C-alpha cells in the first residue's frame, strides 16, 4: 500500500478512535493532515482575536511550514497508528 493510501486510510481511522484525543493531539492531527494534503499553509490568519480555536489550528498548521507533504503524511499515519493501540 502506497503512502497516499495509508494516509487516506489513517484519516478514516482517525474518525473512529475509541477515545477522543486531547486537544493538543487533535491539533497535531489537524496540522499534519493539512500539511500532508494541502502543503504549506495557504490561508490568512483568523481576523477575530477571540476565535481561539481557529487561531490555534492556524498556528499549528503554520508551524509545519516547509515540511514536505510526504513527511507530514508519514507522521500522520504513525500518529493515528499510535492512537489506535
Image: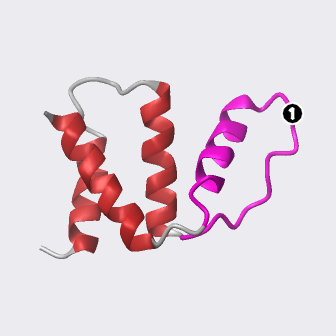
Question: Is 46 within the magenta?
Answer: yes
Residue 5 in picture, x, y percent from top left: 22, 70
Q: Residue at x 42, y 24 (%)?
A: 22
Residue 4 location, quadrant: bottom left
The residue stretch that appears in magenta: 39-65
Q: Nearer the viewer, residue 14 or 83?
A: 83
Q: Residue at x 60, y 46 (%)?
A: 60
Q: How is the image coloured?
A: secondary structure
In the picture, measured across the screen, residue 31 lies left or right of residue 49, that is left
Residue, disc 1: 49
In the picture, measured across the screen, residue 41 lies left or right of residue 10, that is right
Residue 67 in picture, x, y percent from top left: 51, 67
Location of residue 63 with respect to 50 vertically, above or below? below
Location of residue 77 with respect to 16 vertically, above or below? below
Q: Residue at x 12, y 73 (%)?
A: 1
Q: Secondary structure at mark 1?
A: loop
In the picture, measured across the screen, residue 32 lies left or right of residue 5, that is right
- Mark 1: few, some, or many residues within 10 Å (few <14, many ≥20)? few
Residue 14 location, quadrant: top left
Location of residue 82 with respect to 9 vertically, above or below? above
Question: Is 84 within the magenta?
Answer: no
Amino acid at each position: 500500500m502506497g503512502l497516499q493510501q495509508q494516509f487516506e486510510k489513517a484519516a478514516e481511522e482517525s474518525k473512529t478512535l475509541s477515545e477522543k484525543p486531547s486537544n493538543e493531539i487533535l491539533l497535531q492531527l489537524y496540522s499534519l493532515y493539512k500539511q500532508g494534503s494541502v502543503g504549506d499553509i495557504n490561508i490568512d490568519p483568523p481576523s477575530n482575536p477571540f476565535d481561539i480555536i481557529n487561531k490555534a489550528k492556524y498556528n499549528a498548521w503554520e508551524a509545519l511550514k516547509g515540511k514536505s507533504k510526504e513527511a507530514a503524511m508519514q507522521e500522520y499515519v504513525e500518529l493515528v497508528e499510535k492512537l489506535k493501540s
